[in-house]
Image (spheres, rainbow, N blue to C red):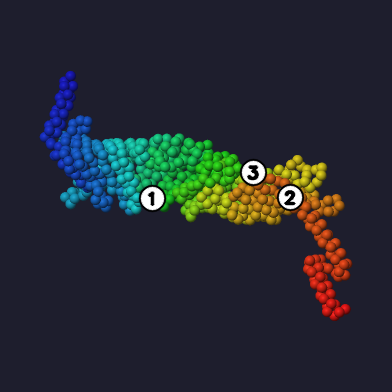
């Protein structure tokens, strides 16, 4: 009992001494001691312009208004920190001995101006000053890392300017920092609101004093935003160096981007809605951000590989290589009715404006390999593509690509530097024409495997304008195949036919493109006992056909029979019919020529003169009449 009474008495005595010291030291005096201690430990001036009050609860210390903390000499005239109200917590035991040790700092509506210079030094790096009156032993004994055990900021404004970079500012920031040991680990709890909704950053930084001085330290951070969260574990420094493992899980990417201040960014349907990523991540000042052993999930699409991201230029630059299995990006197109199917077949190409402004937002080059790839326009098989984007000009190189049942090599270009244009230079082999023409042009009446080449160029701000401006050239050859919709054998022969189709052994043609119209005059079609030639126009812009097939059949008597076939109208429903005028014209020409020959023979007999085939009968008669009149007139004059 006696020891209990002594212990209670000692506690009461300590509290009495503490209260006595507190009462004997006015707030201004304690504030002066605190500011002197800060200057001694940091070499920076802490000024208090407003009233100072001593507090017992909830924090033993002082409350001061109008507080400013001096900036680094190279960082400009504005203070490193200024606050409407600052609460400084003091260690009670040290205070009894007359020593002021700051244990806690909390600020309401502070403004922090953070910056780094060209050497990477931060203006928050604090060094204890040395004076001529301070001995080496004294300096070493008093030298210690300045620290605050607890730091709390409410409603803060943070401005950060890296040397040579534009300033970054965050408002309505709440920060809690627990740093109990100067050379130990700091626990961080930060809330920022760049887009209105809070983004929560929490974690730990090992050897926080090293981190503040610019060295790298162990870091484990978690970032939680509305719709997404990210974790990082590794090494980092305040200069921006990072090296560790990062993971991202975004279940609502657009909501997360809005919380980060990118409310105008829309994630295309084909890239979500659930985005995941994991990679070994590294970055250093002046170097690209590298993502090694990358695993990327875009909705149901899974990709692996590595990427590099450069952020120092006018726009980000991405390079790397990715591989995937079965990919489906059919939701990426933002242009409704942009393809050849559906209403386009009856209403023409879409005239909706095409927005290609996204091409200017990033540069890069990515090698992409996959087992299959589905888009809104076409579906690829196992392929290797090289994708490059530079100053709003995108190029897709096929190395090669499996497409339409065959292979395609070459490149396609989309250029938005001075207005939107598209172009390509492609060669192909084994292409299934029914699939290729059906998916790209809505025309599925031609079947067979084709090889060939095409070059094209088009420009305009809509699909309709591009299709009506196409120019270029190409050729193709097809082995065995067939047309549906008309039967040449049934037209040329009796008792035969192929049930409404034309089966051929070979088809070849070359063509030119001009103002959205394909021109051809050398088509050759060979089928059983028949050879057909073709010439005409395919109006791609207007989706119209104006084409003439001229098949020729050798009959049993050796005579050549031709029945031309005219194909006209919209390619969704063309009219296919024999051109009887073209078929009968050779016979009419032959009858006319025979009649002229008989007239020449009769006139030759009557006129007793030879009339050549190239002579005009009207001129012969005219000359004969003039000659006869002249002879009769001379006879009259001579009186004979």
Give the spatial CA distance, label 1 vs label 2: 75 Å
Of callouts 1 and 2, the N-terminal one: 1
Q: What residue did someone put label 1 on?
A: 285
Q: Is residue 600 above or below residue 197?
A: below
Nearer the camera: disc 3 or disc 2: 2
35 to the left or right of 185: left
Whether the residues at callouts 3 and 1 have beta carbons within 8 Å, the answer is no
As helix, strand or loop, the secondary structure at mark 3 comes to loop
The percent coordinates of residue 233 (x first, y second) are: 40, 39
The percent coordinates of residue 261 (x first, y second) are: 38, 41
The percent coordinates of residue 175 (x first, y second) are: 30, 37
As helix, strand or loop, the secondary structure at mark 1 comes to loop
Q: Give the label on residue 572, or none.
A: 3
As helix, strand or loop, the secondary structure at mark 2 comes to loop
Q: How many marks?
A: 3
The quadrant in which the N terminus is found is top left
445 vs 182, nearest the viewer: 445
Give the spatial CA distance, label 3 vs label 2: 21 Å
Give the spatial CA distance, label 3 vs label 1: 59 Å
Crowd around label 3: few <14 · some 14–19 · many ≥20 (10 Å):
some
225 to the left or right of 59: right
The percent coordinates of residue 432 (x first, y second) are: 66, 45
């Amino acid at each position: 009992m006696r020891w209990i009474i002594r212990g209670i008495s000692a506690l009461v005595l300590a509290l009495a001494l503490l209260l006595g010291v507190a009462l004997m030291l006015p707030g201004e005096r304690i504030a002066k001691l605190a500011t002197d201690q800060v200057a001694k430990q940091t070499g920076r001036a802490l000024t208090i312009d407003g009233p100072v009050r001593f507090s017992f609860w909830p924090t033993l210390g002082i409350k001061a208004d109008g507080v400013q903390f001096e900036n680094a000499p190279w960082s400009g005239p504005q203070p490193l920190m200024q606050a409407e109200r600052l609460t400084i917590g003091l260690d009670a035991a040290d205070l009894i001995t007359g020593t002021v040790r700051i244990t806690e700092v909390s600020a309401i509506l502070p403004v922090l101006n953070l910056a780094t210079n060209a050497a990477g030094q931060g203006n928050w790096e604090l060094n204890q000053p040395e004076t001529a009156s301070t001995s080496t032993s004294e300096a070493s004994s008093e030298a210690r890392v300045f620290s605050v055990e607890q730091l709390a900021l409410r409603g803060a404004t943070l401005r950060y300017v890296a040397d040579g970079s534009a300033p970054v500012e965050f408002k309505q920031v709440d920060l809690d920092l627990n740093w109990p040991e100067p050379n130990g680990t700091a626990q961080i709890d930060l809330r920022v609101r760049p887009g209105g909704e809070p983004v929560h950053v929490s974690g730990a930084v090992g050897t926080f004093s090293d981190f503040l001085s610019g060295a790298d330290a162990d870091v484990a951070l978690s970032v939680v935003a509305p719709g997404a969260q990210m974790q990082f574990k590794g090494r980092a420094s305040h200069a921006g160096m990072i090296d560790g493992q990062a993971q991202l899980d975004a279940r609502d990417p657009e909501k997360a981007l809005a919380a980060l201040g990118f409310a105008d960014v829309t994630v295309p349907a084909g890239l979500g809605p659930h985005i995941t990523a994991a990679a070994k991540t590294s970055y250093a000042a002046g170097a690209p951000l590298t993502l090694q052993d990358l695993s990327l999930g875009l909705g149901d699409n899974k990709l692996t590989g590595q990427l590099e991201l450069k952020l120092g230029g006018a726009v980000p630059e991405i390079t790397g290589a990715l591989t995937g299995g079965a990919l489906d990006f059919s939701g990426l197109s933002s242009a409704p009715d942009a393809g050849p199917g559906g209403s386009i077949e009856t209403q023409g190409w879409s005239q909706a404006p095409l927005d290609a402004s996204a091409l200017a937002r990033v540069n890069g080059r990515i090698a992409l390999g996959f087992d299959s790839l589905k888009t809104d326009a076409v579906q690829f098989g196992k392929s290797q593509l090289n994708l490059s984007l530079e100053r709003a000009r995108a190029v897709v190189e096929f190395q090669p690509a499996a497409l339409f049942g065959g292979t395609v090599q070459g490149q396609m270009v989309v250029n938005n530097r001075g207005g939107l244009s598209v172009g390509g230079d492609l060669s192909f082999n084994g292409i299934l024409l029914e699939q290729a023409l059906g998916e790209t042009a809505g025309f599925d009446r031609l079947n067979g495997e084709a090889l060939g080449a095409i070059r094209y160029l088009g420009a305009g701000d809509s699909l309709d304008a591009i299709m009506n401006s196409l120019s270029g050239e190409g050729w193709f050859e097809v082995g065995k195949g067939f047309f549906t919709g008309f039967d040449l054998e049934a037209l040329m022969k009796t008792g035969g036919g192929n049930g409404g189709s034309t089966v051929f052994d070979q088809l070849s043609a070359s063509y030119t493109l001009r103002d959205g119209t394909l021109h051809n005059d050398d088509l050759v079609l060979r089928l059983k006992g028949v050879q057909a030639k073709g010439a005409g126009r395919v109006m791609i812009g207007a989706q119209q056909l104006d084409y003439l097939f001229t098949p020729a059949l050798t009959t049993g008597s050796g005579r050549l029979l031709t029945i031309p076939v005219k194909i006209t109208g919209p390619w969704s429903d063309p009219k296919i019919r024999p051109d009887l005028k073209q078929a009968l014209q050779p016979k009419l020409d032959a009858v006319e020529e025979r009649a002229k020959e008989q007239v020449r023979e009769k006139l030759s007999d009557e006129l007793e003169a030879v009339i050549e085939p190239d002579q005009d009968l009207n001129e012969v008669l005219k000359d004969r009449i003039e000659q006869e009149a002249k002879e009769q007139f001379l006879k009259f004059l001579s009186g004979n």
